[in-house]
Image (tube, rainbow, N blue to C red):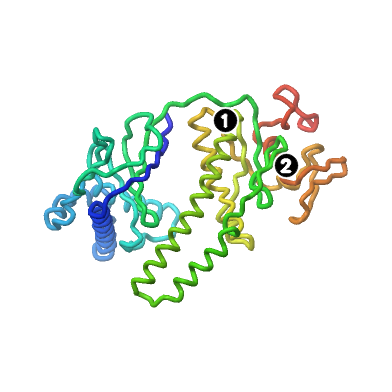
Amino acid sequence: MPTLSYKYRIEPNRMQAGALSGMLADFCQLYNAALQQRIEAYRRRSICLQYGNQALELKAVRCAAPALARWSFSSEQQVLRRLDKTFKAFFARGRGFPRFRASARYHAAEFRVGDGLTIRKNRRLGFVGVPGDIKVRWHRELPRKPSSAILTRQAGKWSIVFHVAVDVVERAGPDSVGIDFGLTSLIALSNGETEKRPNWTKRAAKELRRRQRAVARCKRGSNTRKKRKAALARFHAHVANRRRHHLHKISRNIVNRFGRIAVEDLNIKGLARAMLAKHVADASWAQLAAMLDYKAASAGVEFVRVDPRGTSQQCPQCGQVAAKALDQRRHRCDCGADIDRDVAAAMVVHFRAFGFWPGAGLESLSERVAA
């Protein structure tokens, strides 16, 4: 049973917003104190503390620090688990030692629904330590009672993200599709369809420069600079929301139409270090692939990632390699093929994932496969 996230805007009043901000600040101090304890324990005694060691001391810490005792005990346990996950990720990758967090950049807290966070009968939210009930914009109904939630603060706006286990709903079509990610076209489908890249960053560049100049002209540490920085953050969030909304519509349309989906397993981080880094980041291929992945899982759709090497060089009609430069946007081969470069790559992705070319059917594989 897959678990989906349902995000809702919440509207705390001034007193409630101040309490929520204070809660995040206290959680940030707890995170930093736990990190410092781990560092000192290893430096002085060569002891590697784990989550269990620090969780046993949490009650004593709450007694010594009344500010922490105001908030939910289980949510403070989640802060320690968050630090433990960070250390495990560090040991797994061998780099990126956990760092201390600034309270101004600590924007999320985890809760168990019914323990620290309660959905009232009046459909408002109650948090331990926060006065009153907080209004929620229920723009859609929850399919069932959530098990956990994350409180987030983004560009001065508060949201709650519920985690809900949902049943798989079979609503996929019978067809299969291969998808090629690109910069000229955001995606190209193996059936010949393409989706133009909106280029959100370029469209927002003028307004972004104006707001960045306004920040640069302000004196550091002044109240005016804080206001300008907040306005800049809100604009960045607005652009990100438009991009995410567009990707949601594309991914939902594809999942509703096709029963099997194949995409390129691209190394996005490697591509983001190249000369086209700005355009790669604006295209948000990783975000689109993640949306397709979880939406396919909830709809009973097969989702496959394939090796992207050579997909744009292989001919989808004869199977031979037809090398071409990046600026050559048409695939032309000696066999007579003349197809859009991205569509041809999508057809190759489809073949690598499912073993047959688009439109061929499962029982009529190409002759060059047997060869």
Q: Is residue 132 left or right of residue 300?
A: left
**Residue 47 visible from this viewpoint:** no
Amino acid marked by disc 1 = Asn
Which is more N-terminal, label 2 or label 1? 1
Q: Which residue does the image show at 59% across and 52% down from the upper left?
A: 283
**Residue 83 visible from this viewpoint:** yes
Judge whether 117 appears above or below 267 on screen: above
Residue 173 x %, y % = 60, 26
Classed neighbour count for the residue bearing mark 1: other residues with Cα under 10 Å, few (<14), some (14–19), many (≥20)? some
The N terminus lies in which quarter of the figure? top left
Q: Which residue does the image show at 39% across and 61% down from the upper left?
A: 97
Judge whether 182 appears above or below 144 on screen: below
Residue 43 x %, y % = 28, 65
Observer-nearest of 66 and 371: 66
Which element type, helix, strand or loop, lies under badge 1?
A: helix
Q: Is residue 72 left or right of residue 299?
A: left
**Residue denoted by label 1:** 256
Observer-nearest of 88 and 138: 138
